[in-house]
Image (spheres, helix red, strand yellow):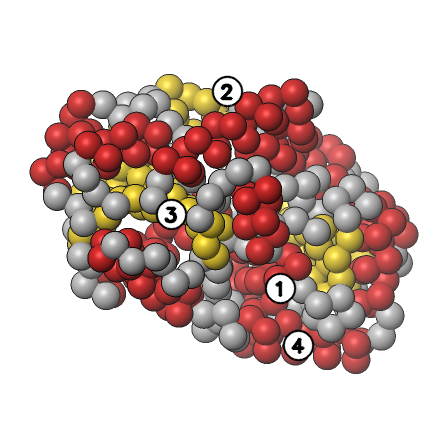
């Protein structure tokens, strides 16, 4: 099997989309599947990934996200993809690279699959551009219906896509590496760092991009309302300086970007995960926190309803409901034994959500489309 992967964002950028894509590429290599990646060309981007070719598409900087380059594929892109002779083309949320790629795949008579990774419609509302939402959904619907099959990351997104007219939507669930994100990575040294020297306090953890749509600023009232709570923020992004000013004078520690064992240790060494984001397609960090044994208090976005059982492994509040977030944190903190039980429950659920099984389901979907069968997921 030979797979052409089209994506709007790629390494060295790190975000939820790239994380899933890297996991997918590693799994393809493990299963002996050849692939090529078509992605916006960045100045410091490698032309290959573990021996597999990366075809760079020239583009310009996207104003709302300066870390992104946007632009359509070119005749050179088409020739490179044609030379690869793919059996199937998988589009990671087709937008510009993907739209042109869909046209290429049709010309090459290659089966096509589009997977949903970014809730652009919700982002337009958050940035005060809600009048563009119908246009965004029209464009999304057009692109996804141009593919032979579509995949959603959660039941919530699946229902929303179908409600907006996307046909033939399957479910490609998300997973976690439960060996890496594991309670065994707890560290007193990391706990000292996260708590700024106050390890006896209750550490609330946020991990992710520091940007306005994540609504991290809404955690400040939690710190004021819950005695003994401290906040550790892991990640970087355009809102970093504004957030530092916003949390000045509060028990908040900015840890910067962490990866690998440091990141695993940060999860395992905290007491609970707090996630007030306004928009997500799934929320990988939520299940990573659960795998590390943390109860989660999260807004109802993305795949949260598929993961969190209120009162069992966490609490859920509606987007923007700061009082609901405060109540959730208080409930988890009400007694240490409750926090420990909820953390164990979170871990037990995460252990059932392994990446290899999720990726193997995707490979079966590839094979179904190549063979002309209706996908089973």
Q: Position of residue 14 (x, y in %)?
A: 44, 44
Q: Can residue 250 be seen in the rendering of this structure?
A: no
- Callout 3 secondary element: strand
> Mark 1 or mark 2, which has the lower sequence index?
2
Q: Front-most of 181 and 154?
A: 154
- Look at mark 4 in the image and give the residue it sits on: 345
- Look at mark 1 in the image and give the residue it sits on: 307
- Look at mark 3 in the image and give the residue it sits on: 149
Going by the image, does 325 lie left or right of 150?
A: right
- Callout 4 secondary element: helix
Going by the image, does 277 lie left or right of 257?
A: right
Q: Evaluate if marks 1 and 2 touch, with contact meaning CB atoms under 8 Å apart.
A: no
- Callout 1 secondary element: helix
> Mark 4 or mark 3, which has the lower sequence index?
3
Q: CA distance from mark 1 to mark 2?
A: 34 Å
> Mark 1 or mark 3, which has the lower sequence index?
3
Would you call the spot at circle 4 few (<14 residues within 10 Å), some (14-19), or many (20 or more)? many
Would you call the spot at circle 3 few (<14 residues within 10 Å), some (14-19), or many (20 or more)? many
Q: Which numbered dot is residue 272? A: none
- Look at mark 2 in the image and give the residue it sits on: 63
């Amino acid at each position: 099997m030979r797979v052409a992967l089209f994506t709007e964002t790629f390494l060295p950028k790190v975000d939820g989309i790239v994380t899933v894509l890297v996991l997918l590429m590693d799994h393809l290599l493990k299963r002996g599947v050849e692939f090529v990646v078509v992605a916006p060309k960045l100045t410091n981007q490698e032309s290959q990934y573990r021996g597999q070719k990366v075809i760079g598409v020239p583009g310009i900087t996207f104003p709302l996200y300066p870390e992104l380059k946007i632009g359509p594929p070119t005749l050179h892109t088409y020739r490179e993809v044609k030379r690869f002779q793919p059996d199937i083309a998988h589009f990671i949320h087709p937008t510009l690279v993907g739209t042109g790629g869909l046209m290429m795949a049709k010309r090459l008579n290659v089966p096509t699959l589009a997977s949903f990774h970014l809730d652009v419609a919700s982002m337009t509302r958050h940035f005060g551009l809600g009048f563009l939402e119908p246009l965004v959904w029209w464009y999304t619907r057009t692109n996804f219906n141009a593919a032979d099959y579509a995949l959603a990351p959660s039941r919530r997104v699946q229902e929303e896509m179908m409600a907006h007219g996307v046909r033939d939507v399957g479910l490609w669930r998300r997973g976690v590496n439960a060996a890496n994100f594991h309670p065994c990575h707890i560290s007193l040294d990391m706990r000292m760092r996260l708590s700024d020297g106050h390890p006896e306090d209750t550490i609330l953890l946020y991990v992710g991009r520091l940007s306005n749509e994540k609504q991290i600023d809404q955690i400040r009232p939690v710190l004021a309302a819950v005695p003994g709570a401290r906040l550790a923020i892991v990640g970087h992004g355009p809102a970093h300086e504004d957030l530092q000013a916003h949390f000045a004078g509060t028990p908040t520690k900015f840890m910067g970007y962490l990866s690998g064992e440091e990141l695993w240790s940060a999860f395992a060494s905290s007491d609970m995960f707090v996630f007030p984001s306004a928009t997500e397609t799934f929320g990988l960090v939520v299940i990573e926190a659960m795998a590390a044994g943390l109860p989660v208090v999260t807004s109802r976005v993305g795949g949260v309803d598929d993961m969190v059982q209120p009162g069992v492994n966490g609490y859920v509040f509606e987007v923007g409901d700061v009082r609901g977030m405060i109540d959730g944190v208080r409930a988890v903190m009400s007694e240490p034994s409750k926090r420990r039980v909820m953390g164990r429950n979170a871990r037990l659920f995460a252990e059932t959500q392994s990446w290899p099984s999720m990726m193997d389901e995707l490979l079966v979907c590839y094979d179904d489309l190549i063979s002309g069968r209706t996908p089973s997921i």
